Image (tube, helix red, strand yellow):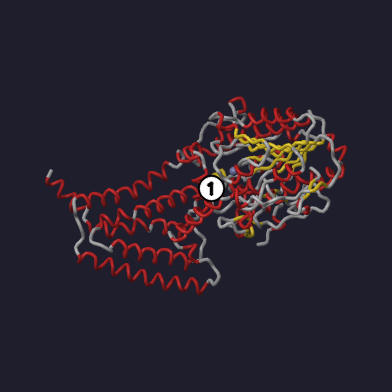
Amino acid sequence: MKHFNDIIKHIFQPAALLWVFPLLLIIPNVALAVTESDPILFKITDIILPLGVYYLQTSITLNIGLTVACCLPLMILAAFQIVLLYLYGESIIAIDMFLNVATTNVGEVSELLGNLIFAIVTVIVIYLPPIIWAIWLMLSRRRLSSRQLFRPRRLGLTAALVGLILLGCCFAAYPGAAVMRHIFPVNVCSNLVSAVKRTADTRGYKDSSADFSYRPTATRESAEREIYVFVIGETSRADNWQLDGYERPTTPHLAAEKNLIFYPKTLSESNTTHKSVPMLMSYLDASNFGDSICAAKSIFALFNDMGFHTACFSNHSPNHSFIDFFGGQADTSAFIKSQSATKFDSDLIGPLSDFIEAYPEGRLFIVLHTYGSHFNYRERYPDSHSLFKPDNATDADRGNRQQLINAYDNTIAYTDCLLDSIIRRVGREHCNAAVVYTSDHGEDIFDDSRGRFLHASPTPTYYQVHVPFVIWTSDEYGENYPETVRHAAANRDKNVSSSKSAFNTIIDLAGLTTEYADPRYSLAGEDYREPERIYLNDYNEAVELVKSGFKEADVVNCQKHNILSLIHI
Ligand SMILES: [Zn+2]
């Protein structure tokens, strides 16, 4: 036993930890140097400078166990970063990523974590041993000698000085570039602070938006019954829609609907739910989201002011985000999921039907926020809607791609049935009515050599932003407003931004306007204008889509769908 203890003491010397620990902390920086497409000068700086600082801080005192234990937050950041690189293949931990963690419900987190076991085990294997090592050194009161600090301090000082010179070169070589956004973990700490600030801004939303009013007006006379339904999809990408040319019959009901228009060249300006949905539910788009989200109200406020009865029914869980606040501005709002753990989107039909029946003469505006095609796909539809089989594999593994695609296609087919049910329910009212559908964003499903999966990654892909957009109008609407329907049909092959056009199109269909509207982006307008392709990045800045992290493969996919006309490379 004594012999064993001697071996342990020999291996786990304080000096060994001093040399090893900075090398473990620098792992994310080395990984980012491989994954990111930054200039080489940035990459070298991002390794030399932090490594120098790590050696300096690790050799700051003789009590190496305590020093390493105090670095626990750094280890957590490094571990989180490695897991995200495993998940998305690139990018630092984004502000949105912190917010997603804060706003995602427990069920979603457990679904995701279950598929990241390999990455989680890896970071545990890397970072748990030094923690145990440090604790053991503290408990056994083992410390460094002063002489042992000399060489690591010299190395740290040299590397830090070289790193600072390189940092100066970065600023000089790339004036105007946000250099510190490329130095880990400074960038991630800054993002964490921004996430906290945004959370505080969100909490203060009620006060900051109190004075907002759309001051809407009517563009036509209407005392008749009208019903407008806006269905907001989740994670549905256009490429898996039969209406978009997909080879599988995923949207047979909609394909057979005569009063339906599908817009195949639609891109969302965000790949995250918590940004995209507020843009769909308000006049905001990528160009003004960052400045105005805290002061804006939702489309419900506009319809309320015009005397409509409004309702918002959601199959998401409430998470105290802008989506909740916007939905709460409807006369009636309900989260059907909170009443029971498992709800399918078809459970939204009941509240919709009840609301329509509650106002047999009224003018109605209703938003249905579906859970659509969100991972885990197999849980989004009942067994009776399992058309494409096998569809049971749920691990985030490229080897399961065909089963994941089968399950995903089943969610699209289920959405097709849902929209068909909504259209038939609204159609039964025989009044001026329209149903508009789009999805908040799309999804990656191991589509190319990048092996990307899911959405909400710090940089978007073609599959994450190419979404379906659908307008259906009732026979009565077509008879009363034939020009509007004609314009909507004439614009079917135009480039569309769902973020810009959803709001402007819906209020135009309803014969309403506001000083906040931009009628040029109404798909029902005669003078429809195709949008610049912009994207709302992690810093809430509108950037050109091609500069948002789009890769060659994404541009090629846009070209295939003839969506490139307004993307300038
Ligand atoms: Zn979403």
Residue 213 higher or lower than 333, as above or below: below
Q: Which residue is mark 1?
A: 452
Seen as rendered, the residue at the extreme top is 384
How many marks the image carries: the answer is: 1
The structure residue drawn at horizontal position 35% and vertical position 66%, both measured from the top left corner, is 52
Residue depicted at x 25% and y 62%? 61
Q: Is residue 497 above or below residue 437?
A: below
Task: Tell me if the residue at label 1 has its CB under 8 Å from ligand 1.
Answer: no
Residue 103 x/y as whole percent: 52, 44
> Which is nearer the eye, 543 or 396?
543
Q: Is residue 94 visible?
A: no
Image quarter (top left, top right, bottom left or bottom right) of the N terminus: top left
Q: Is residue 96 left or right of residue 145?
A: right
Circle 1 SS class: loop
**Quarter of image, res 421:** top right
Q: Give ligand 1's quarter of the image.
A: top right
Where in the figure is residue 298, as x and y percent of width and height? 67, 46
Of residues 347 and 324, which is closer to you in this image?
Answer: 324
Going by the numbered disc 1, the residue's amino acid type is Arg
Q: Is residue 372 visible?
A: yes
Which part of the image, by quadrant, shows the C terminus?
Answer: bottom right
Residue 306 appears at what percent x and percent y? Answer: 77, 43
| Quadrant of res 260 | top right
- Horizontally, residue 9 falls left or right of residue 477, namely left
The residue sitting at 68% across, 53% down in the picture is 559
Local crowd size for mark 1, using a 10 Å CA cut-off: few (<14), some (14–19), many (≥20): many
Q: Is residue 78 above or below residue 145?
A: above
Most extreme residue toward the left is 2
